Amino acid sequence: MNVLLVAGVKGGVGVTTVVAHLATALSYQGKSVVALDLCSANQLGLLLGLPYGEHRGLVTQVAIGEPWYSACFQSKAGVYIVPHGYIEGESSKSKQASSERIYTAINDQLDALVGDDIESIDLPFDSWLIVDFSSAYNLPLDWQKLLCRADLMIMVTNTDAVSYSCLNRTFEDQQAIGTSKMMCLINKYSSSNLLERDIYDSIQHQFSKQLFPVTVHDDKNIGQSLASKQTVFEYAQHSQACRDFGLLGTWLVAGQCENQ
Amino acid sequence: MKHRFSLERYFDRIQNSEDVSELFEHLNASDLTYNEFQLEKACIDAADRWALLDEISGDRQERRE
């Protein structure tokens, strides 16, 4: 089981989009993939085709004492999705209190989340678990424990000034916590303006050893595909974004083969 | 096989020889390939253009020393 955590240097860099498309790319390459949403915005299921009104997910199952994977759906491309979910009808005050209870329960299940329970779902040994960690830094989760169980943490960034500043801070923290499993993925890159090109060069120069050799380019098809409730693989299969995510999936699979 | 950087090859592409000499010395450019030198120079130029990039680069330099 390959475990990937995907987080962003800040909000809005496209973590959920990356998770949805990477999961789909791997699935199209014949891999079994579980996409787990730890982000309370609960958008991963939507990007993978779940109905807007679907509220079941990780938090609803944990709240009723069921295993986290019991709210598992499957996308058209065959990705197993465990949405974050939300509890219907809660006020924001009681939502906060129940969130704290739920994340205490999730922490208790953390080992199972990325370890033994995955084996019990009966997936092939070369399956992939991709975790949408978007805003998980703000959650009371023992994310350092998750990091220890992960094979790789993908840190998504854009090529704007604020993201670049956050990226530098993130990798300083990485040195502070001593993990070498973090790699940087540039998302939504557009070479049409000088600042983005300069920041792109600076990231390449500074993080060359920890930078994915694949860059995901800015592509309007991504927004349009979401509005059509599809991924770019279905919506615009000849698009730049489709090629980029396909290549990213291929690179990861090739790395998996090398490590075996 | 990497080509090691040659100042003479780059000389034709720039106008101010003083700039290049200073850059060459600063980067210890003879240890770099031409592509690496281009990236180094691009990053120095970028820091000159944008105050934030200059600050981050300077902060990194200070922490190394």
Image (cartoon, rainbow, N blue to C red):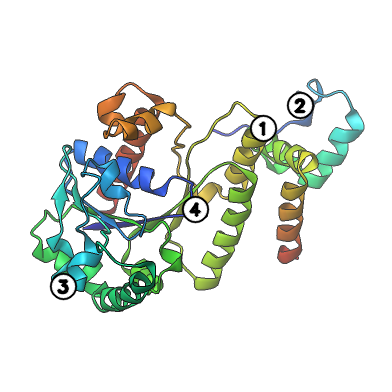
From the viewer's perspective, is residue A120 above or below residue A72? below
Mark 3 nearby-residue class (10 Å; few <14, some 14–19, many ≥20): few
Pointer 1 or 2: first along the chain: 2
- Asked if badges 1 and 4 are on one and the same chain, I answer no
One can see residue A12 in this view: yes
Q: CA distance from mark 3 to mark 4?
A: 30 Å
Number of the front mark, 1 or 3: 3
Q: Which mark is residue A11?
A: 4
Q: CA distance from mark 1 to mark 2?
A: 8 Å
Contact between labelled residues 2 and 4, with CB atoms less than 8 Å apart:
no
Q: CA distance from mark 2 to mark 3?
A: 68 Å
- Asked if badges 4 and 2 are on one and the same chain, I answer no
Which chain is disc 4 placed on? A
Q: Position of residue A125 (x, y in %)?
A: 14, 56
Q: Which residue is mark 2?
A: B10
Q: CA distance from mark 1 to mark 4?
A: 37 Å
Contact between labelled residues 3 and 2, with CB atoms less than 8 Å apart:
no
Q: Which residue is mark 3?
A: A64
